[in-house]
Structures are given as C-alpha cells and as structure tokens.
Image (cartoon, rainbow, N blue to C red):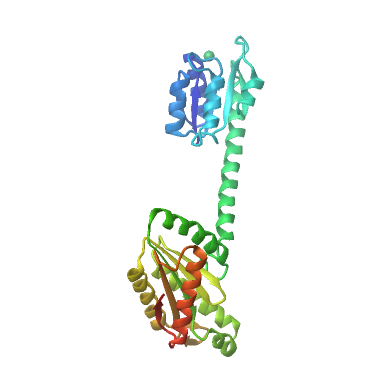
Amino acid sequence: MAKILIIDDSKLILHVAKSILSKQSHQVLVAEDGKTGLQKAAIEHPDLILLDLILPGIDGYQVCQQIKKATITSDIPVIMLTSKSEPSDKVRGLEMGASDYVTKPFDEGELVARVNIHLQIRELHENLKEKNRQLKEMANRDGLTGLHNHRYFQETISKDFQRALRYHESLSCVMLDIDHFKKFNDTYGHQTGDIVLETLGGLIDKLTRASDLSARYGGEEFALLMYHTASQEAFMVAERLRKAVEQHKFQADNQVLTVTISLGVVSFPHLEIANAKAMIECADKALYRAKKEGRNRVVVF
Ligand SMILES: [Mg+2]
C-alpha cells in the first residue's frame, strides 16, 4: 500500500482516479489546486504524485518544479496528467522533473501499471540509498571491534575541534593503550590477542556515553572524544574505564585473562592546544607518562 496524492482541478478526474487507486488498496489524498497540492506534498510526504498540468493559479509545471526543488519532496515521483483537449507540453513537464505522464481520460489498466512502475522504482531507489548509507557506515568502522576507525576519528576530531574553538566549547580527548599487549599475542597467539581487543572494544562502547566518539586508533590503541566535557569529568570517565577493564575477566578459549590499560587525558581549552593535531599529540604524551609511571593509570596532560 502506498500513499498517493492527486492534484487536479476536475472533481470528476479526482473521483475516477481515486476510485481506481483505492481499489489497489492505496491511500489516496486529493488537492484541487497547486497551492494546496504543494502543502499536502510537504506535510503528507506521499510516495507518488499525480499532477494535472492545467490548474488554476499556480500551473502544473510550476508545481512540479517546486516539488523537485524542495529537499523534503524532491524524491517523490511525479506523473503528469495530460488531457487531449487541453494544450499541454509533456516534454516541458519531463524537463521540470516529472517521471512520466498519463493521458486523460484514463485507461484503468494503464494508470495502475504506470503508478506501480514508479512506486517500484522509488522503492528500489530507497533501498539503494539505505544500502549506500550502510556501506558508508561500514567504511567508518573497525572490522574487529565495531568501533569507529582511525580515519573516521581523525576526520571527526579535526572538524569538531574547529567547532569547539569557534563556540568556546570544552572538548576532551583520551588516548588509551593495553598494557604489555605483546605478551598476549606472544604467549597465547594472535587469536587470543584479537579476543582481548574485541572485548575491550565492547567495554569501551558500554562505558562511554552515546554522544561520545570511541575509535580503535590502531593496533592496541584506542581513542575517545568527549563533547562538552572538561578535564575533571573526562578524568572520571577515563578512571571508570580503567577500573572496569582491570576488574573484567577476559575470556579467551579456556583461559581467564587480566588486562590493564593506561590512559592519557587532554582537555580543551588549554594553552598548548591550538589544533586537533596538538590535541592528539598531548593526549599521547599523557599516555606515555602513564606508561612510564607504572601503567594501569590515568594521567591528565
Ligand atoms: Mg485541469
């Protein structure tokens, strides 16, 4: 079942088209002039529009043009209704963005067939858009942990740092790294190493707020970006994560492993941070200090 809007100034045409399409169990809306039609198109967002070209006030060509111009309605297919007795220009209608035309008086079978074709095309188009969205989302993710990947993190921090700078918002970044990760791979094999990374990814995802950004930065290194978050609060999030990891029993094959992480926290505004690159470097320096001071700890830059 689809929602179809018919715009025509003839009550007879509206009645006939409505009864034909209602029989196909479509929901049918009608409008008798262009202005009402445009309003209904924007509010109701129908799946398809049947549009008469010769209308009082704004004519069908202008209506079509406006439907195609407005972002909210531009993807709705428009089928022109043209009458043999009325002067109309089908080519002009197609140039304005209409998908097809049907000549009045209708042949019931033809009207139904054309409507169905354009509903199908629209559905395919919607599916394609959804698939593209999914692909784009996948391209931003790390395959092992499901967190965002390095490239996406870099893009986002560059963009969001500029925004924080412009609007004087606080922004915090955490770099964290698994302590002695090499030993998991060396002692238990790479598969166990992967399980550790995957489990840690899950913990990070669970313990960070939905509005924050978490990413696998590379290897055993992860990065967080926390919006509207000053140093003290960022430290608390980092410390909570550190404790949760320390207490978590990592299950790999038949073993239970203990994992600890070191974290470096940096918060903007800060005198030494003028851009996203400096922010990452300072978080890295804090992380390096956390390692040097004995690991399994949070250091604020
Ligand atoms: Mg008319």
Side of 264 relative to 64 (left or right):
left
Side of 272 relative to 76 (left or right):
left
The residue that appears at 58% across and 30% down in the rendered structure is 115
Q: Give the farthest residue toward the top.
A: 85
Count of marks placed on residues:
0
Side of 294 relative to 89 (left or right):
left
Q: Give the farthest residue toward the front.
A: 271
Q: Is residue 146 above or below residue 61?
A: below
Can you give x and y, in whole percent of width and height, for residue 263 in the image? 44, 77
The image quadrant that residue 134 belongs to is bottom right
Q: Nearer the viewer, residue 135 or 301?
A: 301
The residue that appears at 44% across and 55% down in the rendered structure is 163
Can you give x and y, in whole percent of width and height, for residue 7 in the image? 49, 22
The residue that appears at 52% across and 27% down in the rendered structure is 66
Q: Give the farthest residue toward the right.
A: 91
Q: Nearer the viewer, residue 131 or 162?
A: 162
Residue 150 can be seen, yes or no: yes
Q: Is residue 155 above or below residue 294?
A: above
- Quarter of the picture holding the C terminus: bottom left
Q: Is residue 155 above or below residue 176?
A: above
The image quadrant that residue 208 belongs to is bottom left
The residue that appears at 40% across and 79% down in the rendered structure is 298
Residue 260 can be seen, yes or no: no
Can you give x and y, in whole percent of width and height, for residue 4 in the image? 50, 30
Can you give x and y, in whole percent of width and height, for residue 138 in the image? 57, 60
